[in-house]
Amino acid sequence: SAPLPCPPSTYTDVPQQGSCFPCPAGYHCPSEATQVPLPCPRGSFCATGVAVPTPCPRGSFNPWEGASGVGNCSACTPGMYCQSNGLTAPEGACEAGYYCSGGATVGTPIGEATGGRCLAGHFCPPGSHTPIPCPRGSYADAEGTPAVGQCKSCSSSRHCEEGGLIAPGGACEAGHFCVRGAESRVPNASYTNLQAVEVSRDGEESQVAGRC
């Protein structure tokens, strides 16, 4: 009797051979009588003896052919998200006000190990992989701040000496005063005719804080 064709997931590269071989890892054998296994396509992986490639799971992607296991699927890039199965590249950037630390499945993760809502005291522009502390002289008292410009200036008569604050710091030292955005409790200031000015890094003067 005539030999039967090799079933899907197997192959034989020798005509009229009486035995079939499992499709090798990194390849798939989708049809009967396969003679040449096909490379596993991008976005998928193929274990030994498969007819149909397995898509990489959500939160991962694979840009290469020939993957042999789920371990060949890469965790979604930090700052990006991978919402669908079978991706060859991340789908998009994490949304403003959130951060994606790697392996994220959505652009607005909440309460997940792969990211979350931007922490109080920080800001997260689009594509953030970790929250960025609000700079000195400012604070953020709520989660989800989307940009550095949304960090609030330190309150009058208070100082914000450190970055990443969730509330203004204490009062300025005795003998000094602080207007909005003060970065120090003891401002390094010069004053003339009782008008206090602070010398900035570039040499320009601004009315930020000073000595009474």
Image: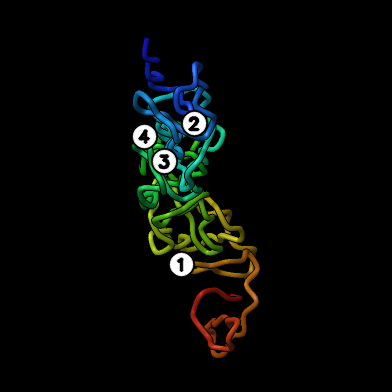
Does residue 55 appear left or right of residue 199 in this picture? Answer: left
Callout in the foreground (2, 4): 2
Q: Which mark is residue 41?
A: 3
Does residue 1 appear left or right of residue 72 in this picture? Answer: left
Q: Separation of disc 1 and disc 4 at Cα?
A: 49 Å
Q: Which residue is mark 2?
A: 13
Q: Which residue is mark 4?
A: 85
Mark 4, other Cα within 10 Å: few <14 / some 14–19 / many ≥20: some
What's the amino acid at mark 1? Arg
Tag 1 or tag 3, which sits nearer the N-term? 3
Tag 4 or tag 3, which sits nearer the N-term? 3
Q: Is residue 42 above or below residue 1?
A: below
Q: Which mark is residue 180?
A: 1
What's the amino acid at mark 4? Asn
Q: Separation of disc 1 and disc 2 at Cα?
A: 78 Å
Mark 2, other Cα within 10 Å: few <14 / some 14–19 / many ≥20: few
